[in-house]
């Protein structure tokens, strides 16, 4: 395991063992800031939300619920991104549609192909895989969306995170959830088994030289016609050498951010089409808020943290981080792409 992988694993293992009760209010605030609603948060076991989100991939995943009609699924997507490409693969535009990088409130309208049947029968459940599933935050929500005949699978490399996720699972009534130990660059699951791959603020933690492997794995795991829906922190511009070398901000999902063009190249390089990348314009400086006497939070000098992907920053680096406007350098992006049906 490389030094960066070891640092990330150690950091998040520590977060999994941490008592987050003292930061409960801030953890909830982070989730609400990035697109979840109170109903989402109340539907999951206590301890599943660690406050490490940078978006809500489920909002664009278009997961098929039991008895959910195609029109309802499309409406759910449209309420998130008005007039944008709907997420279900049978509603996508022509494969030659170029990458779109949108900054709200802009929107692009698509005319749905007339030959596609938007009233087609929908299976009673889908298989969704969450890369870097942590305490199971998105896995548990996805499980309820796909229904009892669907499957929701979490993948994580940290034993402590997997222990936490399974502990959380034992508190729920869900029977369609499982967790797998694996790096997201080499996942021990069968090819072509997933309808949708999601991930929330995790791919940026993979060293740049290995990121292409993640997208190759996503492609391998998806069935033809499957889709990927990712929330991640991407760089608005080339990061400064100081930021790139900041270990605290690396494990905090900032310094490992890739450029939008790099994400596009990795997706298209393995064959994905209908690539859509949206800058959500979220305020990432929320990660620097302090929520208790120990000043926990991204950019704070605390020993532990439950935000900004759980950043822990030494006290000697406190002032440097406090003066950085995260929004200048990076942003919260939502990424959607489709594996062609004939792939």
Image (tube, rainbow, N blue to C red):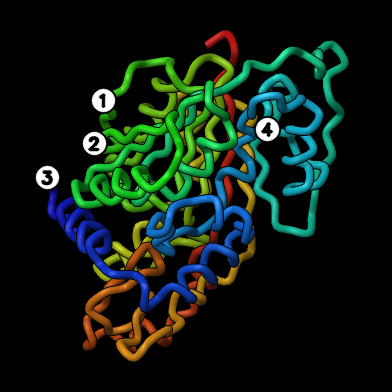
**Residue 246 x, y percent position in the rendering:** 27, 70
- Distance from disc 1 to disc 2, alpha carbons, whole Å, reads 8 Å
**Residue 102 x, y percent position in the rendering:** 69, 51
Q: Earlier in the sequence, mark 3 or mark 1?
A: 3
Left or right, 113 with reference to 43: right
Residue nearest the observer in this picture, 178 or 189: 178
Q: Earlier in the sequence, mark 4 or mark 2?
A: 4
- Distance from disc 4 to disc 1, alpha carbons, whole Å, reads 27 Å
Residue at position x 53%, y 44% in the image: 141
Which marked residue is nearer to the observer: mark 2 or mark 3?
2
**Residue 43 x, y percent position in the rendering:** 55, 51
Residue corresponding to mark 4 = 87
Q: Decide: marks 1, 2 in contact (CB < 8 A)?
A: yes
Residue corresponding to mark 1 = 188
Q: Is 106 drawn above or below residue 217 in the view shown?
A: below
Q: Residues within 10 Å of mark 2 (few under 14, many from 20)?
A: some
Q: Earlier in the sequence, mark 1 or mark 2?
A: 2
Q: Decide: marks 4, 3 in contact (CB < 8 A)?
A: no
Q: Earlier in the sequence, mark 4 or mark 1?
A: 4
- Distance from disc 3 to disc 1, alpha carbons, whole Å, reads 17 Å
Left or right, 288 with reference to 181: right
Which marked residue is nearer to the observer: mark 4 or mark 3?
4
Left or right, 156 with reference to 284: left
Q: Which mark is residue 1?
A: 3
Q: Earlier in the sequence, mark 4 or mark 3?
A: 3
Left or right, 1 with reference to 16: left
- Residue 246 shows in this picture: no
Residue corresponding to mark 2 = 181
Q: Earlier in the sequence, mark 2 or mark 3?
A: 3
Q: Quadrant of residue 248?
A: bottom left
């Amino acid at each position: 395991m490389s030094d960066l992988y070891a640092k990330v694993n150690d950091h998040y293992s520590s977060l999994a063992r941490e008592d987050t009760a003292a930061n409960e209010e801030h953890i909830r605030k982070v989730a609400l800031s990035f697109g979840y609603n109170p109903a989402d948060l109340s539907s999951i076991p206590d301890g599943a939300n660690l406050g490490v989100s940078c978006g809500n991939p489920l909002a664009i995943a278009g997961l098929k619920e039991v008895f959910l009609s195609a029109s309802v699924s499309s409406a759910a997507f449209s309420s998130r991104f008005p007039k944008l490409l709907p997420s279900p693969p049978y509603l996508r535009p022509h494969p030659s549609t170029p990458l779109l990088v949108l900054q709200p409130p802009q929107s692009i309208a698509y005319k749905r192909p007339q030959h596609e049947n938007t009233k087609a029968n929908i299976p009673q459940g889908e298989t969704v895989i969450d890369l870097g599933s942590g305490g199971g935050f998105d896995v548990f929500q996805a499980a309820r969306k796909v229904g009892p005949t669907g499957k929701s699978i979490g993948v994580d490399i940290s034993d402590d995170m997997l222990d936490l996720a399974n502990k959380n699972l034992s508190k729920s009534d869900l029977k369609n959830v499982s967790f797998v130990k694996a790096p997201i660059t080499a996942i021990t699951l069968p090819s072509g088994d997933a309808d949708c791959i999601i991930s929330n603020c995790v791919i940026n933690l993979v060293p740049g030289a290995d990121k292409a492997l993640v997208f190759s794995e996503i492609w391998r795991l998806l069935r033809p016609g499957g889709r990927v829906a990712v929330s991640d922190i991407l760089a608005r511009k080339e990061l400064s050498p100081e930021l790139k070398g900041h270990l605290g901000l690396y494990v905090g999902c900032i310094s490992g951010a890739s450029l939008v063009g790099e994400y596009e190249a990795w997706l298209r390089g393995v064959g994905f089409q209908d690539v859509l990348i949206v800058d959500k314009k979220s305020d990432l400086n929320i990660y620097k808020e302090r929520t208790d006497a120990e000043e926990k939070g991204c950019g704070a000098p605390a020993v532990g943290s439950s935000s900004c992907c759980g950043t822990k920053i030494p006290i000697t680096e406190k002032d440097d981080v406090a003066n950085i406007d995260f929004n200048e350098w990076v942003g919260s992006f939502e990424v959607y792409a489709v594996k062609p049906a004939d792939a």
